[in-house]
Amino acid sequence: MVEGRPVSGARRLQRGDQCRPVDSDTGLTPKEVMGILRRHVLLIIFVTLLGFCLGGATWYGLRRFVPSYSAEALIEVLPPIEDDPTHISQTQTNKDNLYNHRVTMANLIKQQKAYQDLLQLDTIRKTAWFQQFDNEPDAIKYLMKYLTAYPHRDADFVSVSMNCGNAKEAADIANTMSELFVSSQRNQKQGEIDDKLSEYARQKEMIQIEIDGYNKAIQDVRDRWGVTFIMGEGSQIINDPTLVKLNGIQQDESKLIMSISQLTATIQNLERLALVQINDAQIQNAIQAHPMIQRLEEQISMQKATLEGKSQRFGPNHRVIRQAQTLLEDLESQLIEQKQKVAEQTRQANLKNARDTLVTFQANLETLQQQREEAEKSKEDADRARVEFERLDVKLKERQVALAAINSQIDTWRIKRNTPDSAKVLLKAAALPPLKMTATRHPLLWFPLGLVLGLVCSVALAFLIELMNDLVRTARDVSRYLHVPLLGIIPDDHEDDDLSNDTDLFQVVRQMPYCQLAESYRRFRTNLELSKAKTILLASGEPEDGKTTSAVNLALSLVAKGKKVVLIDGNFRQPMLLKVFPRLATDIKGGQYGLSNLLMGQCTIRQGLRPTGVEGLDLIDTGLLPPNPMELLSSPRMDTLIQELRKVYDHIILDSAPVLLVSDAKVLARLADATVVVVNADATRRGAALRVLHEMRSVNAQVFGVLLFGARSLSGGYFREQQRSYQEYMQPA
C-alpha cells in the first residue's frame, strides 16, 4: 500500500479476489449457440438456398455433360481346396477363410497388371471410352478409380463393376475384364497342373528306372546262387532248396544218431547175454525154428509115445522099456545140447549183426555229417542271398508303391486339368447395359445434398465469423477471455431510443438521468462502491475507448448521490476534460493552472482546482504539457497531492493516457485504490485487453474489474432482452 493510506478489511478482500474470474467456462452454452444462429439467420438461409441451387445445378450438369452408368458382372469364387475329382466328397471350410479368398481374388482383379492387360485388347482400345484419354497411364488411373472388384461377404461372388459415360461400353468393359481374369486364372491353373504333371512324369521315369534296376539285381541274386525263391505273405521265403536239403540232412542225421544210440544199447545187451545163459524170446524163436531141434523134438515125442505104449504092455522094468528110456534120455540130451548150441550161435550171430550194423550206421553218420557241413555252407550262402533278396524285394515294393501313387496323382491331375472349375473362378453372370444412370446422378441425391451442405457451410461460416471476431463484445467474453470481474456494461448510444441527437454523451447522467445509458452508469457506480475505494483510476488500452466519457459520467453519478468528487485529467498527451468542462470567464482571469503546474510547484492546490459548473464536482486540468510527464506523475508531489485531496473529497477520479501507448497510467495506478479497465466493445480486441491487464498487474495495480463500453445488443443475447425489459419497466403506468 501507499504510505499513510489506510486499507480497510473490505479493500484487502477486494485486492485478494479482484483477479479471479467470475465464470471460467470457455465452452459455448446452448443459448449462445442459438444466439449465434439467430444473429446470422439471413446468412444461413442465403447460403442454404445457394447450396440447394448449386446441388440442382450440379445434378443437371452431371447428367447433361458427365453421364455415368455402372455395369456389374458376377464371378463365382469356389472354395480354394484341391478336392480329389475321383471321389465325391464335401469339404467344409471356414467362412472367414472363404471371404479372405474372395478378397484375394478381388485384389488380383484390381492389380495394375490386370488393367494393363485389359488395355492391350483391341476391343477395349476401339471404345469411345478409351479414345478420350491422351495416353495409357491416364486410362489406367481411371480404371483404378472406376473399375472395381467387390467381394461379397455372405455369397460366393466377386462383383466386377465398371462406371463410365456409355452404358454399353460399361457392360463390355466389365465383361471383358471378368473374362480376362477368369481366363488368366484358368491358364495359370492349367500351367501349374502341367508343371505338376511334368514333375510327376519325371519322378515316374526315375522310379521306373529304379524298379528295373531292382528287378535286375534280384535276377542277378537268383542267377549267382542258383536258387529260385518263392515269396509268401509278408515277404517270407517259402521254397528254398538249400534250406529244404539241409533240413532233410539234419532230420536224417538226427534219426541216424538215434538209431546208433539204440544199436549201441542193443550191442551192450547182446554182449551181456553172450556172457549169461539167458534165453530170450529171440533165442527161443531161433531154437524152435531150428530143423534139427524140431526133428529131435519129434523123435522125443514119438519115443515118449512108444515108451508109454510099451510100458502098458511090458511094464516099467522091462528091457524094452529100459532101452526105450535110454534112447529117450539120449534124445533129450541131444535136444538140450542142440538148443544150447543154437542159442549160442543165435547170440553170437545177433551180436555180430549188431556190430556190423553199428559200423554201417557210423559210416552213414560220417557221410551225413559231411553232407550237413556242405549243406550249412550252402545255407550260409543262401542266407546271404536271401538277405540281399529281401532287401532288394523291400526296395522294389517301395518303389512299386511310389509308382502306383504317382500314377494315381497323374490320373487325378489329368482329370483336374480337364475340369472347367479347376481355376476355382467362373463367370457366373455377365454384365448387361444399365438402363439407368448411377445413383450419383439422381436428383434425390444432389438436391438434398446441396441443401444439407449449404446448411452445414452456412452454420460453419456463422461460427467462423463469430470465432474470427476477437473483440470483447459481451459480458460472456469478459469472463471467458479476460477472467476479471465485470463492473458494468455501458450500451452504445444508438441502442438507447430515449437519447436525443443533441445529448452530450460526456454528461448523459446529468442531462438524461432516466435513460438506460444513465442507468448503466449508475449500476457501474454501485458495483464500484463495493471496493470502498476513494481514488479510482480509469484506464484503457487505446485512445477513444470511452475512458474519459466513463470517468466523467462516473463522477456525475457519484455527485448525484451527494458525494464530493474531484476529476483529475492525467492525460498530458491528449487532454479531454477541458473540452468537456470548458473554462468559465472567471476561471480564465485566474490563470491557466493545472496538474503540471501543481507538480512543478508553480501554484497551490486551491489554484489548480476549478469548478465544473456541477455542484460537488471539481476539476484539475492537465495544464501546460510538460517535457517530462512521467517524472512529474511519479514524483512525491503527486503522492502528496492525492493525500491532500483525499482529506477534502469523497472520491478522486483519475483520467489517464492509453496504457498500451505510454506508461503514464501505470504510474497513476500505483496511487489509486482501485483501477478500472475500460474495454470498448466495438474496438478493443482480446489480446489488447489482456495486455492492458498484464501491464497493470506488472506494477501491482489494484485492478478492481472491467467496464464494457459501447456494447451493442446482439440478436438472441441477454443485453437485448435487458433493454426491452428496461424500456417496458420505465413506461408510465
Image (spheres, rainbow, N blue to C red):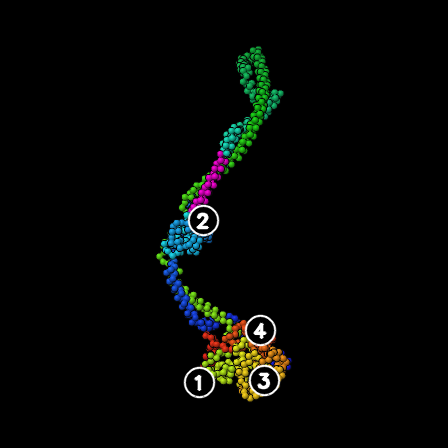
* Rendered-image quadrant of the N terminus: bottom right
Could you say which is closer to the camera, residue 309 or residue 286? 286
In this figure, which residue is indicated by the disc labeled 4?
694
Vertical side of 176 occupied by 285: above or below: above
Question: Are discs 4 and 1 less than 8 Å apart at CB?
Answer: no
Residue type highlighted by circle 1: Ala
Q: CA distance from mark 3 to mark 2?
A: 107 Å
Mark nearer the viewer, 3 or 2 = 3
**x and y percent of residue 504 in the render?**
49, 83
Q: Amino acid at mark 2?
A: Pro
Query: Magenta segment, which residues?
Result: 185-212
346 versus 95 height, above or below: above
Residue wearing tag 2: 80
Q: Which mark is residue 733?
A: 1
- Residue 197 lies in the magenta-colored region: yes
Residue that label 3 marks? 593
Q: CA distance from mark 2 to mark 1?
A: 93 Å
Query: Of callouts 4 and 3, which one flags the residue occurring earlier in the amino acid sequence?
Result: 3
